[in-house]
Image (cartoon, helix red, strand yellow):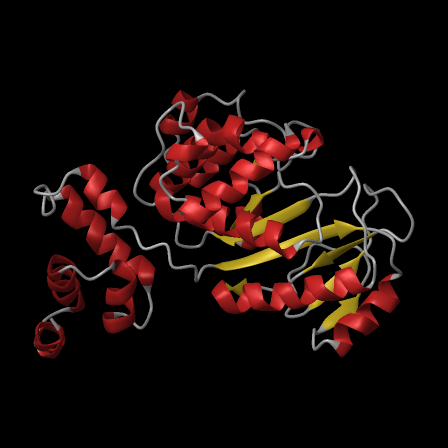
Amino acid sequence: MNEQVTNILNQNITKTAKIQQLLLLGLTRRQVADLVTNGNYGFVQNVYKKMLEAGTFNHQPAAAILSEIDYTFNRRFGIEIEAYNCDKHHLACELREAGINVVVEGYNHDTRDHWKLVTDASLSGNNTFELVSPILQGEAGLQELQKVCWVLEYCNVKVNNSCGLHIHMDAADFTIETWRNLAITYRRLEPVIDGFMPSNRRNNIYCKTLSNISESRIREAQNITQLRSVFGNARYHKLNLEAYARHRTVEFRQHGGTTNFTKMENWIRFAANMITFAQQGMVNAGCQLSSIPFLTADQKIFFKLRTKKLA
């Protein structure tokens, strides 16, 4: 196959034609993006969608196409950790000693190129704070987050029912189809997700349910502006579309406060995989944890155990 790939890459043809031939050869979209478009996955994804629409892959059943989705985690993301029980300046010193670039700032919603420690009036407890990351990416971002969690544990940082964990995922490459699929998938999986979230994160004023938003209205939206309107242009939903206007992200607001890296990592991967899946389709109504198509076997075990623990 390597010789075939080389021959295709050396042809004097357009990038689109090369992408089409490589996809038909059986390469994943991520592999093709790295070979042809210098990592521009969105370009390859658009070519792939047009091939689907043209019936190029009609010889493959839909399930087979979905099973070939590449879930390699390389999406850009950000995280907001709400917590208490540690002076911000002391925590900043410990984070810097661990190699984390962090600044103590006043309350703001600005994206920085460093971690920031800010105030949050919605939190209760002594020495409350919100630790907000810069833009992180993929596995390297998770490694940096793990280091941050080591420091939080060392500093005896705590969380309570007033705290949440918010994840921003890069949405710059979303089509309206991706947005609709993501909203419907989250809505359909909400009962499952509720099961592995603390009871206070299943429906509160800061992460409201999607069950009151009709699928038909979601399907009717022709652009992100219309879809945001379907959500009432309100950011306090479990899935926050308003983040797109400010940061070009989609925010996952439902997770309970935590300083535990394992919990964070599994939720980040859950959200990222849901987005990747939404670029192709949506889950069936009534989908159960055991049949979520974008989770690995290990991830299903993790969330199953979380569900049992929180029952």
Image vertical order of residue 261 relative to residue 290, above or below: below
Judge whether 71 appears above or below 7 on screen.
above
Q: Quadrant of residue 141?
A: bottom right
In front here: 218 or 262?
262
Q: Residue at 38% of width from left, 44% of height from top?
A: 294
Q: Quadrant of the C terminus?
A: top right
Between 263 and 24, the residue placed more toward the observer is 263
- Residue at 20%, 43% (x, y): give it: 64
Which residue appears at 57% of the width and 42% of the height?
242
Task: Where is residue 264? Give x, y as percent.
Answer: 61, 52
> Is residue 12 placed above or below 154 in the rendered structure?
below
* Residue at the extreme right of the image, as rendered: 126
Question: Quick check: 64 above or below 168?
Answer: above
Residue 222 as seen in the image, left or right of residue 168:
left
In the rendered view, does 242 fall on the left or right side of 22?
right
Quadrant housing the N terminus: bottom left
Image position, residue 166 (x, y; %)? 64, 47
Residue 243 screen position, x and y as percent = 57, 46
Q: Quadrant of residue 43?
A: bottom left
Residue for point 32% across, 61% down: 41
How many numbered callouts? 0
Front residue of 298 and 22: 298
